Amino acid sequence: MNVKAIGAFFIILIILVGFFFYEKYYNSSGTQPIVITTHNQTTNHTTNSTKPPPPTNTIKTNSTTNSTKLGSCVQNVPIANGNFSTGTYSGWNVTNFGFGSTPLNITYANSNSKNCYYGSPWSNYSGIFFATSYECGLERSVGNLTSKTFTATEPYINFRIVSPASSLLYVQLLHNGKPFVTVHYDTLNASGGTNPESNFEKASIPLVSLICQNVSVRVVSGVVGTISTENQFIAAGDFQLSNKSIQTPGIVVNTTYS
């Protein structure tokens, strides 16, 4: 074999050896890791997208529960016949005869008979009808009015009231049918007018501790009308839920929580 043949042989051998190592190390190391990496990334992505971490489920459940509770509470349904606009005590439970058979029409009372108000015409009232134990000369007796149950969707219940200081005249907030808070008022000394017995004052009772719970309001008159107690009556109306207090300062005598 001559030198040229030997040189050619070694050149071919070197080429074959190089090709062998290229196939074994370069291609395999260049493709196999890519496959492995892709497999890992795919697996991780799939795992992350399908695996529901327990904390996420817990948050979702709590959020749904709170949202449902809040959603049912913020449906602000007005107090049934809270301003007695029907001209009747519909939506209220009437006990005894202290408040008559129907609310008093302020327009009629002020226009037709002095027996329907004490001293001067009724004033500072935003509605047409209100409940009162002063009923156009009728003999007053004890009694109370209790509203239909409603949900406390706002932090206050606001209303208008006329009441002298008396342990027998008051407004209650009921929870589960039982007195939760009892408020006695004296609007006669708070009014700057000459005839405070017929001037309504603004009142508010907080509902914050009862938010989203069912409550009702009760107006109580425990006074029987006589000559000595002729100005011992209570008048109230325009009951409505509100996000703020409107109460006239100084009209509350005492507040008792049961």
Image (cartoon, helix red, strand yellow):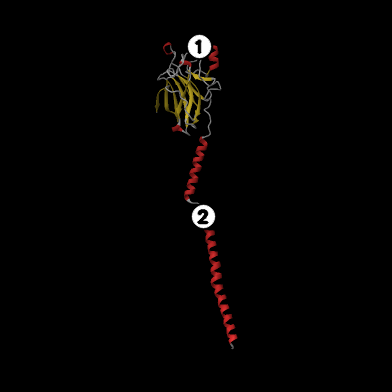
Residue 56 appearing in the image: yes
Viewer-closest of 247 and 158:
247
**Could you say where residue 211 lies in the image, as x and y percent from the top left?**
47, 33
Q: Residue at x 51, y 27 (%)?
A: 240
Residue 35 x %, y %: 55, 64
Q: In which quadrant will I find the N terminus?
A: bottom right
Mark 1 and mark 2 in contact? Answer it, CB < 8 Å: no
Relative to 8, is 50 above or below?
above
Extreme-bottom residue of the structure: 1
Pick the quarter of the image with the C terminus: top left
Residue at image coords 53%, 59%:
41
Label ID, residue 244: none
**Mark 1 and mark 2: span between their CA atoms?**
81 Å
Q: Earlier in the sequence, mark 1 or mark 2?
A: 2
User: Can the viewer see residue 177 in this picture?
Assistant: no
Q: Is 214 drawn above or below residue 99 in the view shown? A: below
| Image location of residue 83, percent across then percent down | 53, 23
Q: Nearer the viewer, mark 1 or mark 2?
A: 2
Secondary structure under tag 1 reads helix
Characterize the local packing of mark 1: few (<14), some (14-19) or many (20 or more) Cα atoms within 10 angstroms. some
| Mark number, residue 48 | 2
Q: What crowding class fits label 2: few (fewer than 14 Cα within 10 Å), some (14-19), or many (20 or more)?
A: few
Picture residue at 58% right of the left edge, 87% below the top:
3
Of residue 199 and residue 4, the one placed in the foreground of this image is 4
Nearer-the-camera pick, 72 or 22: 22
Q: Amino acid at mark 1?
A: Asn
Q: Which residue is mark 1?
A: 115
Q: Which residue appears at 44% of the width and 25% of the height? A: 172
Look at the numbered disc 2 and give the secondary structure of its residue: helix
Q: Amino acid at mark 2?
A: Asn
Residue 51 coordinates in the image, percent (x, y): 51, 53
Q: Indicate left or right for 8 with 174 as reference.
A: right
